[in-house]
Image (cartoon, helix red, strand yellow):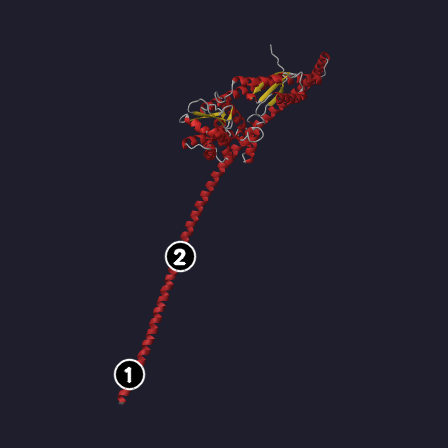
Amino acid sequence: MHGIISYIIVAAVVGVIVALITWFLAIAYRQKIVESKIGSAEEKSRKIIDEALKTAETKKKEALLEAKEETLKTKNELEKETKERRAEIQRYERRVLSKEEALEKKLETLEKRESSLAEKEEDLNKKSLEAEELHEKSLQELERISGLTSEQAKEYLLKTVEDEVKLDTAKLIKELDSKAKEEANKKAREYVVNAIQKCAADHVAETTISVVQLPNDEMKGRIIGREGRNIRTLETMTGVDLIIDDTPEAVILSGFDPIRREVARIALEKLIVDGRIHPARIEEMVEKAQREVEQNIREEGEAATLEVGVHGIHPELVRLLGKMKFRTSYGQNALKHSIEVAQLAGLIAGEVGIDIRMAKRAGLLHDIGKAVDHEMEGTHVQIGVDLCRKYKESAIVINAVESHHGDVEPTSLISCIVQAADTISAARPGARRETLETYTNRLKQLEDITNNFRGVDKSFAIQAGREIRVMVLPDQINDDDMILLARDISKQIEAELEYPGQIKVSVIRESRVVDYAK
């Protein structure tokens, strides 16, 4: 046991000794390796340093060579640029020298011109002084010869020139005026002819009687009735005269009121168809006929507005338009006349280039007063104006109604167009029924009345006797006398003549000077 322990202890001591020796050997080997590495590193570093020194020396030499080359290059460029600058400066110097020489020459030339101009100026001053002296002398001589001063002579010349200019201006104005009138008349005739051609009317004159056809002559006795009761009832209810004569199978209704005549005609036709004719039945049929006529009046008014193409008229004015179907003027139907005037006014307005609808509206309503002129006091013109104002018509329409017979001055072109269209419609052959003798006698009476007054040269009845134009002698009648003469003529016409509506008296005084160039 002790041997084993000793053996273990010896082994342990030997192990420790071997470990120590190994450790020391390892340390020594390691130191040797480290020393050898340090030596090799130092040697390498010396080699690197030597190589670096060699490389640096080489780089230094290369840099020096490059610097020398760059320096030479820069030097050469600078020398070249310097040479170019010198050459350019030399060119500039030569140009400056040439310009200086040219300027010196110009200065010499200018000095020579200035001296010559100064001499000329002196000569001109001398000559102007001489001219002024001569002018003064000539003026004095002219004043002495003419006996006029310079201001008087100037005024005389200006007046002469002014008179010549006035004469030339007057001639030119007269030529232009006559040319304008000629062109205007030509255009007006063209417009009127075109309007008449486009608006063809076939209206005939109407009479104051209506004829009712009977199925047989026995019906005449039934219409008369026992002791004339039926005919008296019919005449009393309608206000129309029944003429029963030898005319076969016909009864004539006579009356100046077309509406009453139409009511009587319709009532009589209904009685003839019904066959029962007695006072009570007559009253019933007359009432039915009145309602029917009133309905026809409204329908005719609406048809007239539709035919013309005018809308927005007050219903009462439409009714009055329809009433005009039963109104005539010298045998011309008033409604057809108004429609014709509206169409003519629209055509002329289209030619002129103004509002066609407004022209048609004014033309359609221009005679609206004729629908009630037998019921109200005043001329149909004044009544028409009042109606148009009452039912809010435009100022243009009112002026057209008021001026279509020349009672007032027209304020728009539409008023003039309506006036022309009214004249065209009334003057159409066959439009109005009046004997030529009656017409000419009335016009002659008008002219005879005016011609009897002192100072009257000529007189002309125009517009179908609605206006009389009186030409007076200017040396006998002055402007103040014209007012009194117009009043005296109008009073004389009122006292001696009977006429519908009113007659306009226009007194004209004209002073005219005529001369001829030979």
* Quadrant of image for the N terminus: bottom left
Q: In the drawing, what numbered circle is on residue 330? A: none
Indicate the quadrant where residue 416 lies: top right
Q: In this view, which residue lies farthest toward the top? A: 518
Secondary structure of the residue carrying tag 1 is: helix
Q: Quadrant of residue 126?
A: top right
- Out of 294 and 278, give the one closest to the viewer: 278
The answer to which of 26 and 506 lies nearer the viewer is: 506
Q: Mark 2 sits on what residue? A: 52
Frontmost of labels 1 and 2 is: 1
Q: Position of residue 299 (x, y in %)?
A: 46, 34
Identify the amino acid type marked 1: Ala
Residue drawn 64% across and 18% down?
162
Left or right: where 13 falls relative to 239: left
Q: CA distance from mark 1 to mark 2?
A: 60 Å
Where does residue 316 sit, x and y in percent of width and height? 51, 35
Can residue 181 be seen in the rendering of this structure?
Answer: yes
Check residue 11 in the rendering and tell me which mark sits there, or answer none.
1
Q: Quadrant of residue 114?
A: top right
Whether 316 is drawn above or below 497: the answer is below
**Residue 453 relative to residue 33: left or right:** right
Q: Kindly indicate whether the residue at mark 2 contacts the one at mark 1 (C-beta within 8 angstroms).
A: no
Q: Work out which quarter of the rendered image holds the C terminus and state it.
A: top right
The reply to whether residue 325 is in sight is no
The picture places residue 322, in percent across and down from the top left corner, at: 48, 32
Type of the residue with mark 2: Ala
N-terminal-most mark, 1 or 2: 1
306 or 59: nearer the eye? Answer: 306
Write the residue at 37% across / 59% down: 47
Local SS, label 2: helix
